[in-house]
Image (cartoon, rainbow, N blue to C red):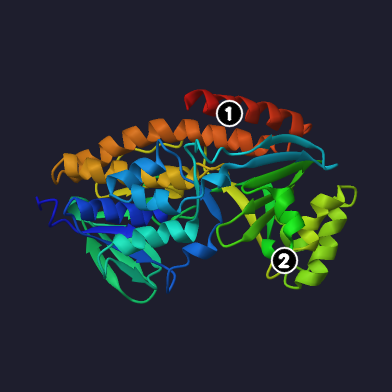
């Protein structure tokens, strides 16, 4: 059996989870290789501001010695939260106390990944490697085949490759399923619209009604990331008639879906500039488990994809930390390391996935404002009592 330092570990995917896994392993003297399908780092384009939780994401950052650097650039004011109904009536206006910061400060996804990348040794990540298939070999090894013709034989392959993981089929037949909710993403330069920036707050705004929502999130670059969410058939984005590739026309068409909403809320559509992106929201079965297999495992969305509710990146970084520490603990016995990690990961991720699914669906339910208000008030009261 190869020692843990000699074992060849491949990580598929260079998002926060994959980067964190490589970094924890590096700190423990174990080398790994990240294979990323994009030709350069695209994390800044894959998401907006993230709240990093004290009991998961921040634990992983502490493990790799980056917590203080994170705290120096994190935005504690980003924990501001406002909830409106469709008529523009405010139901929750939570302002973060800058003198008593909470436990979920914000950071842009790109900045977080930059922090991790800068700490990794040069050559750890290979860009432009899209995994085509992973083939099981003897003794738990796998042969990895990439679309650029490269092949590799590894002792452990870790799928950190998201919702439509190419590694997951080695462990389970489960596939990501459409939730019935689609989203349109826009963006606003808050400096050009100070009145909207003031309305939005320093953190996030949600407006709910008619089984739809408008959300606004202030990012560290001064832009407000806007999301329009709808309950819709899976092919709605393709056949709704909105010219998403023509932003000016698309904004006028999108306004018709919110015709009787408050003008202050429709400004989130009118003031948007730049490209418009669309996406469908997917989930894996809640509580998904599989039998441990030698030489392969999953972290992050590849393992427990759930609708976005603030836990995804935090769980991915915790998964990375737990897996790396298990590899270290079991001193080269990868089967035991994987089994120990997966048992622990199944336990903490299933509850989080259930909560994310319920919370996300609540936002587009009947009488959503009342239900979400009650949920948020309980959450905010719990946060206050824990300080």
- Residue at 26% from the left image edge and 35% from the top image edge: 340
User: Which residue position is annotated with label 2?
Assistant: 192
User: Closest to the observer: 4 or 387?
Assistant: 387
x, y (%) of residue 329? 17, 39
x, y (%) of residue 284? 52, 43
User: Closest to the observer: 340 or 148?
Assistant: 340
x, y (%) of residue 251? 80, 64
Q: Is residue 3 above or below residue 339?
A: below
* Residue farthest toward the front in the current orientation of the protein: 99
- Residue at 16% from the left image edge and 54% from the top image edge: 29
Dividing the picture into quarters, in which one does residue 365 lie?
top right
For the question of whether residue 211 can be seen, the reply is: no
Q: Secondary structure at mark 2?
A: helix
x, y (%) of residue 233? 73, 50
Q: Which mark is residue 259?
A: none
User: Which residue position is annotated with label 1?
Assistant: 379
Q: Earlier in the sequence, mark 2 or mark 1?
A: 2
Residues tagged 2 and 1 counted as in contact (Cβ below 8 A): no
Q: Secondary structure at mark 1?
A: helix
Left or right placement of residue 169 versus residue 156 in this view: right
Please identify, in this view, whether the residue under mark 2 or under mark 1 is nearer the observer.
2
Q: How far is the residue under mark 2 from the one under mark 1?
A: 33 Å
Left or right placement of residue 29 versus residue 148 in this view: left
């Amino acid at each position: 059996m190869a020692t843990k330092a000699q074992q060849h570990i491949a990580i598929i995917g260079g998002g926060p989870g994959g980067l964190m896994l490589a970094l924890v392993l590096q700190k423990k003297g174990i080398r790994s290789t990240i294979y990323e399908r994009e030709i350069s780092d695209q994390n800044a384009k894959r998401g907006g501001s993230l709240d990093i939780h004290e009991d998961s994401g921040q634990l992983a950052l502490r493990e790799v010695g980056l917590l203080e650097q994170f705290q120096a650039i994190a935005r504690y004011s980003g924990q501001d939260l406002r909830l409106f109904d469709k008529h523009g009536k405010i139901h929750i206006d939570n302002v973060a106390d800058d003198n008593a910061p909470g436990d979920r400060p914000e950071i842009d996804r790109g900045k977080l990944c930059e922090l991790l990348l800068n700490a990794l040794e040069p050559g750890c990540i290979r860009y432009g490697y899209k995994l085509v298939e992973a083939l099981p070999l003897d003794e738990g090894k796998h042969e990895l085949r990439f679309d650029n013709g490269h092949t590799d034989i590894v002792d452990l392959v870790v799928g950190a490759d998201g919702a439509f993981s190419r590694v997951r089929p080695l462990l389970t037949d489960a596939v990501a399923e459409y939730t019935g909710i689609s989203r349109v993403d826009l963006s606003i330069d808050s400096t050009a619209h100070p009145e909207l920036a003031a309305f939005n707050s320093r953190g996030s705004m949600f407006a709910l009604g008619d089984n739809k929502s408008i959300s606004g999130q202030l990012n560290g670059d001064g832009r407000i990331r806007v999301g329009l969410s709808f309950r819709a058939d899976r092919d709605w984005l393709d056949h709704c008639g909105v010219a998403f590739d023509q932003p000016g026309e698309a904004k006028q068409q999108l306004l018709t879906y919110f015709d009787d909403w408050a003008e202050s809320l429709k400004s989130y559509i009118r003031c948007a500039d730049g490209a418009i992106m669309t996406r469908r929201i997917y989930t894996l079965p809640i509580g998904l488990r599989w039998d441990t297999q030698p030489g392969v495992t999953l972290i992050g969305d590849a393992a427990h994809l759930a609708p976005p509710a603030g836990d995804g990146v935090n769980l991915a970084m915790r998964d990375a930390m737990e897996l790396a520490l298990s590899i270290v603990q079991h001193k080269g016995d990868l089967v035991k390391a994987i089994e120990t990690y997966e048992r622990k990961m199944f336990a903490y991720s299933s509850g989080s996935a259930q909560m994310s699914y319920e919370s996300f669906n609540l936002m587009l339910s009947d009488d959503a404002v009342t239900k979400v208000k009650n949920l948020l008030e309980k959450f905010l009261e719990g946060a206050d009592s824990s300080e």
